[in-house]
Image (cartoon, rainbow, N blue to C red):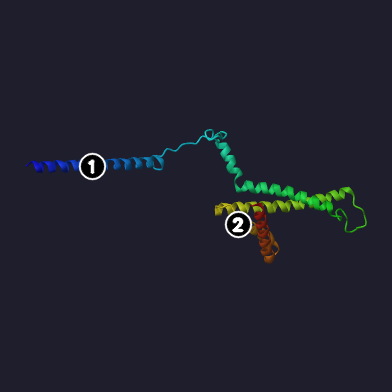
Amino acid sequence: MAAPAQSRDASVTVTSGQSASVSPAENVSLQYSLLLEHLIGDRRQIKDLNPTVMGAMPSPHKTDEQKMIERGMESCAFKSLIACVGGFVLGGAFGVFTAGIDSNVGFDPKDPLRTPTAREVLRDMGQRGMSYAKNFAIVGAMFSCTECIIESHRGKSDWKNAVYSGCVTGGAIGFRAGLKAGVLGCGGFAAFSAAIEYYLR
C-alpha cells in the first residue's frame, strides 16, 4: 500500500515541476508582448521631441497667421505671380540690352540718313524693353502655373513636371500661329525645360 502512495506523490511532484518549468517562459512571453505594446503598439506614448535636447536651436511654435502665410506662399497663384514679376524684370532688362547693341534703334525708316536724337533712341529702347517684359512675364506665369498644377496632380517633384509644363506653355503660345507651330513650340519648350532641369539637378 505504500508503493501507490509513493507513485502518486511522485506524479504530483513531476506535475508541479512541469508547471514550475513552464511558468517562467509564459512570464517571459507575457512581458515581451507588453513591451511590444508599449513600444510599437496602442500603448505607445507619442512624445514631442525637443530640439534643444538634440543639440539644435529651439524653434517656436508657428501661429495660425504664420501657417496661413506659408500656405499662401506655397500656392500656385503666388508662385505664378512671382514668376510673372521675375519674367517682367528679366524681359525688360533683356529688351533694353538688345536694343542697346542694335545699331538701327531710333532710326526712321522713312528717312534713314537722319541721325536719331537721344530721346528717340531712349523711346525705342523703352518700347522694346516693355515688349520683351510682357512676353517674358506671360511665359513665366504660364510655365510656373502649369508646373505647379501638374506637380500637385502627380504628387511628385521631378524633372517630368518641367517637361510637361514646357510642352503645355510652348504649345499654347505656338497654337496662335497654327497647329504646326504649336507642335514645334511644345517640343522646343519641353526639350529646353528638360535641358535646364538636367543641368540644375
- Residue 88 lies, in percent from the top left, at 72, 49
Q: Which residue, as the protein is rendered here, is positioned at the far front? A: 3
- Residue 56 lies, in percent from the top left, at 56, 35
- Nearest to the observer: residue 148 or residue 15: 15
- Nearest to the observer: residue 131 or residue 17: 17
Q: Crowding at label 2, few (<14), some or many (≥20) Cα neighbours within 10 Å?
A: some
Q: Is residue 13 visible?
A: yes
Q: Is residue 127 visible?
A: no
- Total number of numbered discs in the rendering: 2
Disc 1 and disc 2 in contact, CB within 8 angstroms: no
**In the image, what residue type sits under mark 2?**
Lys
Query: Which residue is denoted by mark 1 in the rendering?
Result: 19
- Residue 117 lies, in percent from the top left, at 90, 49
Q: Answer with the quarter of the image where residue 159 lies.
A: bottom right
Horizontally, residue 106 falls left or right of residue 48, namely right
Query: Which residue is denoted by mark 2 in the rendering?
Result: 160
Quarter placement of the N terminus:
top left
